[in-house]
Every structure is written in structure tokens, then in C-alpha cells.
Image: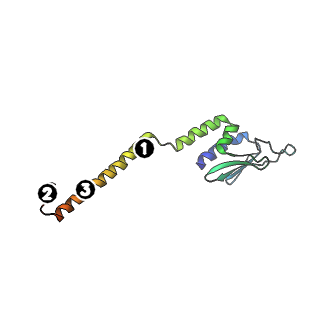
Amino acid sequence: MLYLDTKYISLISGKLQKFKKSNTTYNFRCPYCGDSQKNKNRARGYFFQKKGSYIFKCHNCGVGRTLANFLKDNDSSLFSEYLLESYKAFAVTPRKIRTANIIFFMTILFNWLIILTILTHLFHICNPRAKKKI
């Protein structure tokens, strides 16, 4: 998911004033409050990593957003693309689920057949008078 977040941060970076990257943190002027009106060089909006994804936080106005909500507020077309791509990245199709269920139930059935075969053989070994129908 970090790759996808990084990709969309770089796509929206052109719309953010004073955008800079340092290691895994991104710094820019906050699009919500605009930072300082007196000093145009102030940039107190940040993207930082938290629990495997990027979070936006402004240290001037205190606004905090996930990357998805930040994109929704600031660029709706990028937000739509981000959602579509994130769903594709983690998509589980019904065919995959159906195949996994079939394999699971076949494994259980096979194990039960092995157990029944072993029990049948044990029964005939313990009871020599029983008729063998194997």
C-alpha cells in the first residue's frame, strides 16, 4: 500500500505549494489553512507514515486526514483513481474464493476417506471373523 500512497502523493505534489520530500516525510503549505499569510515560506503541512500508510497533518491549523480523504478534499479525479487502484490491488474475485473453497472441502473429504480406510483395516485386523468387503 505504501507504493500506491507514494505514487499518489507524487501525483498531487504539483498542486501543493513549497512541496519538499525528506526520506519518508513530505512537507508543503497546507491547502486547508494556507499556513501563514505574513510569511509565504512557511510550510507546516506534512505527509508521514503511520501503520503502513500515509497520513496528512497540518501543524498550523491541526487538520489531519488519511491520504484518501486528503485526495477527496483536494483533487476528486485523483481520489477516484486512487480508490480504483487500491481496490484492484487488494481485489479477491469470486472465482478465487470458489476455487479456494473447493480445494478446502476436497482436502477435508480426502482426509476423511483416509481415516475411514484406516479404521476399516483396523476393524478387520482386530476382528478376524468379520467378512472382508474391501
Secondary structure under tag 2 reads: loop
- Residue 68 at x, y = what percent? 64, 42
Q: Is residue 18 left or right of residue 98?
A: right
* Disc 3 residue type (three-letter): Leu
Q: Position of residue 113 (x, y in %)?
A: 27, 53
Q: Secondary structure at mark 3?
A: helix
Task: Locate residue 97 relative to residue 79 in the image: left or right.
Answer: left
Does residue 79 appear in the picture of this structure?
yes
Going 30% across and 52% down the picture, which residue do you hit?
110
Task: Answer with left or right where residue 106 lies relative to residue 53.
Answer: left
Q: Which residue is mark 1?
A: 97
Instruction: Determine whether the residue tagged by mark 1 lies in a helix, strand or loop.
Output: helix
User: Residue 29 occupies which quadrant of the picture?
Assistant: top right
x, y percent for residue 65: 69, 45
Residue 49, position as x, y percentages in the image = 65, 52
Q: CA distance from mark 1 to mark 3?
A: 29 Å
Q: Tell me if I can see residue 11 in this picture.
A: no
Q: Earlier in the sequence, mark 1 or mark 3?
A: 1
Q: Which residue is mark 3?
A: 116
Label 1 amino acid? Ile
**Mark found first going from the N terminus, 2 or 3:** 3
Which residue sits at x=36%, y=45%? 102
Residues 77 and 131: in front is: 131
**Amino acid at the residue labelled 2:** Lys
Q: Residue at x 67, y 49 (%)?
A: 55
Residues at circles 1 and 3 in contact by the CB criterion of under 8 Å: no
First reached walking from the N terminus: tag 2 or tag 1: 1
Number of residues whose C-alpha sits closer than 10 Å to that of mark 1, classed few (under 14), some (14–19) or many (20 or more) = few
Q: Residue furthest bottom?
A: 126
- Alpha-carbon distance for marks 2 and 3? 15 Å
Q: Which mark is residue 79?
A: none
